[in-house]
Image (spheres, coloured by chain):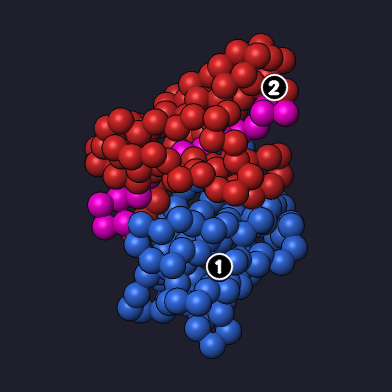
Chain colours: A red, B blue
Amino acid sequence: GAVVSQHPSRVICKSGTSVKIECRSLDFQATTMFWYRQFPKQSLMLMATSNEGSKATYEQGVEKDKFLINHASLTLSTLTVTSAHPEDSSFYICSARDLEGTEAFFGQGTRLTVV
Amino acid sequence: AQSVTQLGSHVSVSEGALVLLRCNYSSSVPPYLFWYVQYPNQGLQLLLKYTTGATLVKGINGFEAEFKKSETSFHLTKPSAHMSDAAEYFCAVSDGANSKLTFGKGITLSVRP
């Protein structure tokens, strides 16, 4: 199956700083990528849909100025958490749909801890 | 709007026993249905999916699921549990290709020796 690589797997940052998470489709082109947030023992909550070459579509309640998404190429989408606060600490997961769009492949996730 | 219901938060079975994880969905259009497995601090791995065609779908690691439109269900089964099956399982629905996934809240499967 297709591979989605997410980096870094873990990051610790200080409050007020920004953190960038990368999501790459390694062996296929992904016009659409999705960013999720997962709290402990909970399900995945969709944050935004990232479309190559256009602005991301954010879900209701997600601050677009805080969670900046860039999808500059068909294989790379980035999520930048700006001015991070401890409440932003979470597990962030990206996914990309294959060309047929019938299957979503997930990255390994990024554990963000803001101290 | 779509939704997924996974009743209960935890299922415990003995090694070698039948695994049954329930999933019911709500969708206004013919759904695409998925089961994913997640191990601690990892992303999600697709177990199986239903898009069209045969309603009994076989996936990896011996899992299978049956799409029952009349019951709006997509329950996941495995005849014989293995210790390595212990993980978090998520059922998800989308309303077609390239559409976003809506996940259930997940269920933790424990396997007793």
Decide: is B23 above or below A82.
Answer: below
Q: Residue at x 75, y 63 (%)?
A: B8
Q: Give the magenta range.
A: A87-101
Q: Is residue A9 above or below residue A17?
A: below
In percent of the image, x 56 and y 17: which residue is there? A18
Q: Residue beneath label 2, please?
A: A85
Q: Is residue B7 among what the camera can see?
A: yes
In the displayed structure image, the side of residue A29 where residue B65 appears, left or right? right
Q: Amino acid at mark 1?
A: Gln
Q: Check the image and report above or below for A107 versus B90.
A: above
Q: Position of residue B98 (x, y in %)?
A: 36, 57
> The residue tagged with tag 2: helix, strand or loop?
loop
In the rendered image, residue B19, in percent from the top left (x then y), is placed at 62, 65
Residue at horizontal 46 percent and vertical 45 percent from the top: A57
**A99, above or below B78, in the image:** above
Q: Position of residue A3 (x, y in %)?
A: 34, 39
Magenta residue check for A97:
yes
Say whether residue B86 is left or right of residue A8. right
Describe the element under mark 1 as helix, strand or loop: loop
Give the residue at mark 1: B2
